Amino acid sequence: MGFFRALGNIVQGKPVFEPADGAGQASQNPQAQTQPQVGQAPQGPKTIPVVQIRRVECVDKGPQMELQVEIINDSREDILLDKIRLLGTVRELDTTLRPGEARQFTVYKGDRTPNEPRGYAEVQYRKMDGDYFSAIHQVRGRKESDGYWDVTEFRLQLPIKDLPA
């Protein structure tokens, strides 16, 4: 190999010397480049854990109410519940749930409404690797005999949102 050819290989990012017998051809095989390196995990589709509000209990205290919900981790991995946004409030949850685990939380204490509750509850949570998600639930209610509305149900709206880091 001549000097200028070796210099051209350096400029192109190729090895300076190439074996003439074809032994170096294996490194140019495109299939060999797509194999994961030893110690690297293969990259598959992203898993999105599902967390949802299952049970609702609305405790009326005159013109005030206390809303208790059960939140369940319907995924196959541990998640950290961060917070819930509901009826104009934000409640920090800061609780880890194992797969299939459910916990009860008091998520609202405040005024009852004479109007049908509309809108959404947002449960924000993250996987242990730091990837954040948001599960949006439609708020449903029932009018009571005293004229106020109680929250009776949360309906999970799919798809789960993958939040930016």
Image (cartoon, rainbow, N blue to C red):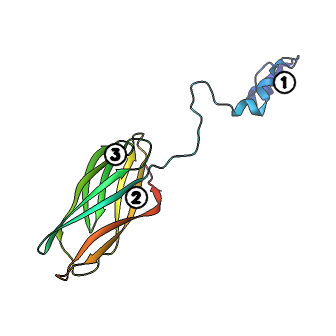
Residue 101's disc is: 3
Local packing at callout 3 (Cα closer than 10 Å; few below 14, some 14-19, many 20+) is few
- Residue 117 placement (x, y as % from top left): 29, 75
**Distance in Å between CA atoms under marks 2 and 3:** 17 Å
Q: Secondary structure at mark 1?
A: helix
Q: Which residue is mark 1?
A: 5
Q: Is residue 34 left or right of residue 116?
A: right
Above or below, 80 against 6 in this view is below
Q: Which amino acid does the dot numbered 1 rest on?
A: Arg
Q: Residue at x 21, y 81 (%)?
A: 114
In front of the other: 97 or 17: 97
Give whichever of discs 1 and 3 has the lower sequence position.
1
Local packing at callout 2 (Cα closer than 10 Å; few below 14, some 14-19, many 20+) is many
Q: Residue at x 25, y 53 (%)?
A: 104
Q: Residue furthest front?
A: 145
| Quarter containing the N terminus | top right
- Residue 26 placement (x, y as % from top left): 79, 24
Q: Which residue is mark 2?
A: 135
Give whichever of discs 1 and 2 has the lower sequence position.
1
In front of the other: 110 or 103: 103
Q: Residue furthest left?
A: 62
Q: Which amino acid does the dot numbered 2 rest on?
A: Ala
Q: Is residue 101 left or right of residue 47?
A: left
- Residue 12 placement (x, y as % from top left): 76, 31
